[in-house]
């Protein structure tokens, strides 16, 4: 039987959780950097005529 207290187990669990959170944050940071680095591509913007056709339910050929 191990003579360790439950506090060392709790410390280990807390440290593992902290490391996992840091990995998640790092991955999110890299993902945001990749998205930002795509040349600032935004959503496609349609003309007023295309928007009106869309509202009317008419499908325009691209």
Image: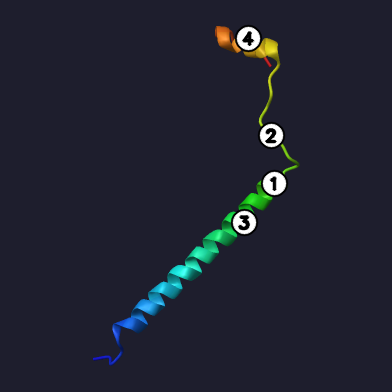
Answer with mark 1 or mark 2, whichever residue precedes in sequence.
Answer: 1
Mark seen at residue 29: 3
Whole-Å distance between the Cαs marked 1 and 4? 31 Å
Outermost residue, left side: 1
User: Which x, y percent locates residue 28?
Assistant: 58, 55
Whole-Å distance between the Cαs marked 1 and 2? 10 Å
For the N terminus, the image quarter is bottom left
Q: Residues within 10 Å of mark 1 (few under 14, many from 20)?
A: few
Answer with mark 3 or mark 2, whichever residue precedes in sequence.
Answer: 3
- Element type at mark 3: helix
Q: Residue at x 58, y 8 (%)?
A: 58
Q: Residues within 10 Å of mark 2 (few under 14, many from 20)?
A: few
- Element type at mark 4: helix
- Element type at mark 1: helix
Disc 2: which residue = 42
Q: Colour scheme of this structure image?
A: rainbow
Answer with mark 4 or mark 3, whichever residue precedes in sequence.
Answer: 3
Q: Residues within 10 Å of mark 3 (few under 14, many from 20)?
A: few
Q: Residue at x 69, y 16 (%)?
A: 62
Disc 4: which residue = 52
Q: Residues within 10 Å of mark 4 (few under 14, many from 20)?
A: few
Q: Where is residue 26, by image quadrant?
A: bottom right
Answer with mark 1 or mark 4, whichever residue precedes in sequence.
Answer: 1
Whole-Å distance between the Cαs marked 4 and 3? 39 Å
Mark count = 4
Whole-Å distance between the Cαs marked 1 and 3? 11 Å
Mark seen at residue 48: none
Outermost residue, front side: 7
């Amino acid at each position: 039987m191990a003579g360790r207290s439950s506090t060392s187990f709790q410390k280990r669990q807390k440290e593992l959780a902290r490391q996992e959170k840091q990995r998640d944050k790092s991955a999110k940071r890299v993902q945001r950097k990749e998205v930002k680095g795509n040349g600032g591509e935004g959503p496609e913007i349609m003309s007023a005529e295309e928007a009106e056709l869309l509202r009317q339910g008419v499908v325009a050929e691209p």
